[in-house]
Image (cartoon, grey):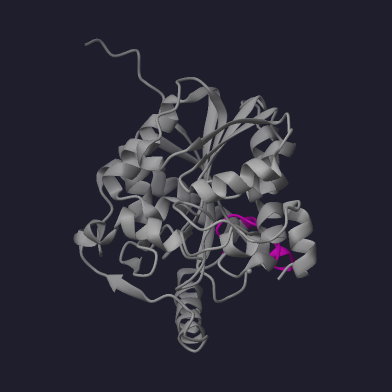
Amino acid sequence: MTSLLLNACTEAASMTTAASATPMDLDQELLAQGEKKSCFSVSAAAENNVAVAQTCLTETQRTVPTTQLHKETTLDISIRNNKLNAEESSAESRGAGADQKVSTVVSNPDFNDKIDYSLATSYWKTIPATVNGMLGGFARISTTDINGSNTLLKWIFSQEVHPGRGRCVDCGAGIGRITQRLLQRNFGKVDLVEQSPEFVAKAKEVFANNSKIGEIHCIGLQDFVPKSATYDVVWMQWVLGYLRDDDLVAFFRRMSNSLKPNGVIVVKENFSSDADDSSAEVIHDEADSSVTRPMALFLQLTSKAGLTLVRLVQQKKFPRQLFKVYMLVLKPEKKDNSRTP
């Protein structure tokens, strides 16, 4: 999972050491802690997805009453405020202590060369298999995070055409925080994909004898090949920043192929900009070798993978020093069968 802070946070994408804590439900852990946690231009291929995102921004600014701005709404923060928040966050992060990870701005397309899978693996070996470990010391945001995600799932299932509730997959599952608190409550079966053997061991401990849990795959997302037409919903949260662009596009395509009819992909990630800022930069985290992409660049990649943006919502009520977090609902592009070869 990519850094939540302008230089810190995580959810599960690579490896870690096993926790020394005694087995406990992840909700109990949170209670015990008191809920404490390349410059580019937008290509023609992504113009439609960017347009959808900008429409969300316009509609929100027009329809959301001022009294409700504190609630979770679609893209209701301006780019100006985004830049101010980023400046404040950067200042806070610099003064937060020596334990903060170091971030650098990469203003050229070579940022993919800075993503080192082995380095990320080594980083996660140092992280405890706890909720606080998964969230980079920000365990206190877990409930807010889950509530925002649950609201999005309710919206997805409220649509006239919506996915089923049969099977979901949690990509970059870590110790199963999202599966336990969100996905198993909304789907009949949940599969987990996690690269860290230590995290997988913890997840198996947490979900022992849980009939809602399906297959647990101990493998990196860049190597995961799911069966076709398997999942109603594919959930990816705080993990895609560990993949190079080409691997991310290939992963999107494989997961798109794994969807059942009406299935969707949900992405919840940090972004270094809003959708209508095409001048933002990719931010590289040297400690865990992840990147935080600008929204427009990310939409280029989803479009390249043949995915259409259906919904874009900003997660609210997170601490100001964290990156902006957005939830995207994506579906495979409809094929035009009317054309003759």
Q: Which residues are magenta?
A: 63-76
**Residue 118 makes an appearance in the image:** yes
Horizontally, residue 300 falls left or right of residue 226, namely left
Horizontally, residue 227 falls left or right of residue 129, namely left
Horizontally, residue 144 falls left or right of residue 50, namely right
Of residues 137 and 229, the one nearer the viewer is: 137
Q: Is the stretch drawn in magenta largely helix, strand or loop?
A: loop
* Residue at the (64%, 59%) spot, across then down: 131
Please state, as top left, top right, bottom left or bottom right, where the C terminus lies in the image. top left
Residue 55 screen position, x and y as percent: 49, 50
* Number of on-image labels: 0
Of residues 177 and 229, the one nearer the viewer is: 177
* Residue at the (58%, 63%) spot, across then down: 133
Name, please, the residue furthest toward the top. Answer: 340
Residue 219 screen position, x and y as percent: 43, 39
Where is residue 40, by image quadrant?
Answer: bottom left
Q: Is residue 287 above or below residue 73?
A: below
Residue 311 screen position, x and y as percent: 54, 44
* Residue at the (55%, 58%) spot, across then down: 75
Q: Is residue 199 above or below residue 183?
A: below
Name, please, the residue furthest toward the bottom. Answer: 95
**Residue 292 makes an appearance in the image:** no
- Is 198 inside the magenta-drawn segment? no
Residue 259 screen position, x and y as percent: 50, 25
- Is 68 inside the magenta-drawn segment? yes
Of residues 24 and 13, the one nearer the viewer is: 24
